[in-house]
Image (cartoon, rainbow, N blue to C red):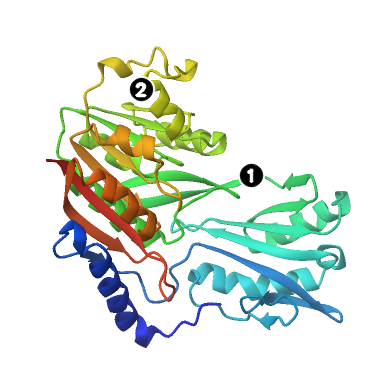
């Protein structure tokens, strides 16, 4: 569990900064650019176990390594105010409807800065029409979207997504965030991260290549900084969300392709051509910059080698250790010009980093 003590936020952040500064000193990163979070109510996502005692159930969490000694959660200050305000109302509504409470074991919240809320209720039972009727009632009362899940079952009362609206350098951008798909949890820090990435973009008459584009988070925010953007992602759900947001924001110069970074690398190397990538004009593109935002495992060696061929690299990382390993390979050809840390996850040891590299 997170222990949230706002008075300690600055000192905890300073510890992270000191650790990152020491870890990456080998790359001569200079002064790290630090982007802070709000000290409370900063997460737009949360999930809780539901624990049953007698006739009542409640939100619960556990200390690491334990599953039998629940801690009752009545207030969770790391989540958005909207989630905090909804939690007691939702649990009261669930406790008043036996069919909603029975066999319920987990609840997930997905909230946006724009005010939308999606709640997923997960059960150890199959859901029927009676459950749908009861869920529709509290959906109407609380003004939220609800999804019911059970083994091999997923019931939508209306939709499985929310629309987030971010302000990036004075421009409003809308994104589709789909239930159970990855989204940046700290929306305000995400806005700062997008602004920083835009400030690294310095080749307006060239094209941007992006790997691991997700729902188009960076692609759409950087689109007006380049002639065109070509972005890849393996998740079909994320690609659908990215194309939805592309249309919603009326952005024409971005192309999304559903291939993995490894498959794209093989295609560009000519070792394994992919049908999804043929006829897209990749051979004629002038990719002067590549942006990568890989999962915690970082980039594989072949992908690292592939992106090292581009003059400019913007690397966003959720794992400093794999970033360090990748930079050891990339520093053979590139120099780190800027380095940033984004405090996406206050009160934890996790840190999001950004590195901007230029070819030697």
Number of residue marks: 2
Question: Residue 99 appears in which quarter of the rendering?
Answer: bottom right
Question: Residue 9 appears in which quarter of the rendering?
Answer: bottom left
Location of residue 327 in the rendering, given as x and y in whole percent from the top left corner = 27, 50
| Quadrant (top left/top right/bottom left/bottom right) for the N terminus | bottom right
Q: Tell me which label, 2 or 1, sits earlier in the chain.
A: 1
The answer to whether residue 256 shows anywhere in this view is: no
Disc 1 crowd rating (10 Å Cα; few below 14, some 14-19, many 20+) is few
Where is mark 2, residue-wise? 268
| Left or right: residue 248 compared with residue 223 | right
Q: Is 18 situated above or below 27?
A: below
In the image shown, does 27 or 174 lie closer to the viewer? 27
Q: Of all residues shown, which one is farthest toward the top?
A: 279
Secondary structure under tag 1 reads: loop
Find residue 159 and name its label.
Answer: 1
In this rendering, which labeled residue sits more in front, label 2 or label 1? 2
What residue appears at the point 55 percent right and 68 percent down from the top-left corner? 83
| Quadrant (top left/top right/bottom left/bottom right) for the C terminus | top left
Q: Is 257 situated above or below 65?
A: above
Q: Is 71 situated above or below 24?
A: below
Find residue 1 and name its label.
Answer: none
Q: CA distance from mark 2 to mark 1?
A: 38 Å
Location of residue 49 in the rendering, given as x and y in whole percent from the top left corner = 70, 69
Location of residue 188 in the rendering, given as x and y in whole percent from the top left corner = 36, 61
What residue appears at the point 25 percent right and 44 percent down from the top-left corner? 330
The answer to whether residue 47 shows anywhere in this view is: yes
Secondary structure under tag 2 reads: helix
Asked if marks 2 and 1 touch (Cβ < 8 Å), the reply is no
In the image shown, does 54 or 13 lie closer to the viewer? 13
What residue appears at the point 44 percent right and 44 percent down from the top-left corner? 175
Disc 2 crowd rating (10 Å Cα; few below 14, some 14-19, many 20+) is some
Q: Is 263 situated above or below 290?
A: above
């Amino acid at each position: 569990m997170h222990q949230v003590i706002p008075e300690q936020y600055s000192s905890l952040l300073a510890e992270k900064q000191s650790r990152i500064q020491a870890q990456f000193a080998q790359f001569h990163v200079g002064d790290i650019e630090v982007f802070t979070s709000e000290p409370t109510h900063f997460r737009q996502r949360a999930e809780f176990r539901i624990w049953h005692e007698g006739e009542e159930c409640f939100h619960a969490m556990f200390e690491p390594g334990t599953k039998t000694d629940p801690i009752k959660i009545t207030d969770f200050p790391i989540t958005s105010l909207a989630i905090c305000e909804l939690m007691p109302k939702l649990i009261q509504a669930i406790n008043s409807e036996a069919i909603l409470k029975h066999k319920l074991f987990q609840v997930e919240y997905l909230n946006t800065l724009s005010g939308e809320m999606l709640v997923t209720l997960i059960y150890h039972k199959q859901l029927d029409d009676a459950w749908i009727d009861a869920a529709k009632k509290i959906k109407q009362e609380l003004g939220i979207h609800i999804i019911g899940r059970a083994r091999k079952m997923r019931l939508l009362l209306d939709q499985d997504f929310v629309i987030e609206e971010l302000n990036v350098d004075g421009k409003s951008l809308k994104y589709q965030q789909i239930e159970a798909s990855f989204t940046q949890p700290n929306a305000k820090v995400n806005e700062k991260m997008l602004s920083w990435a835009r400030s690294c973009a310095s080749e307006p008459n060239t094209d941007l290549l992006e790997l691991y584009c997700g729902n188009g988070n960076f692609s759409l925010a950087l689109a007006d900084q380049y002639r065109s953007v070509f972005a890849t992602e393996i998740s079909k759900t994320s690609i659908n969300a990215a194309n939805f947001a592309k249309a919603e924001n009326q952005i024409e110069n971005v192309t999304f392709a559903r291939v993995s970074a490894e498959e794209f690398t093989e295609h560009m190397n000519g070792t394994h051509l992919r049908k999804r990538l043929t006829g897209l004009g990749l051979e004629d593109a002038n990719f002067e910059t590549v942006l990568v935002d890989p999962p915690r495992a970082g980039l594989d060696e072949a992908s690292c080698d592939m992106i090292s061929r581009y003059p400019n690299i913007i690397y966003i990382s959720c794992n400093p250790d794999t970033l360090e390993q990748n930079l050891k390979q990339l520093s053979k050809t590139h120099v780190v010009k800027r380095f940033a840390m984004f405090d996406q996850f206050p009160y934890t040891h996790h840190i999001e980093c950004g590195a901007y590299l230029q070819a030697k």
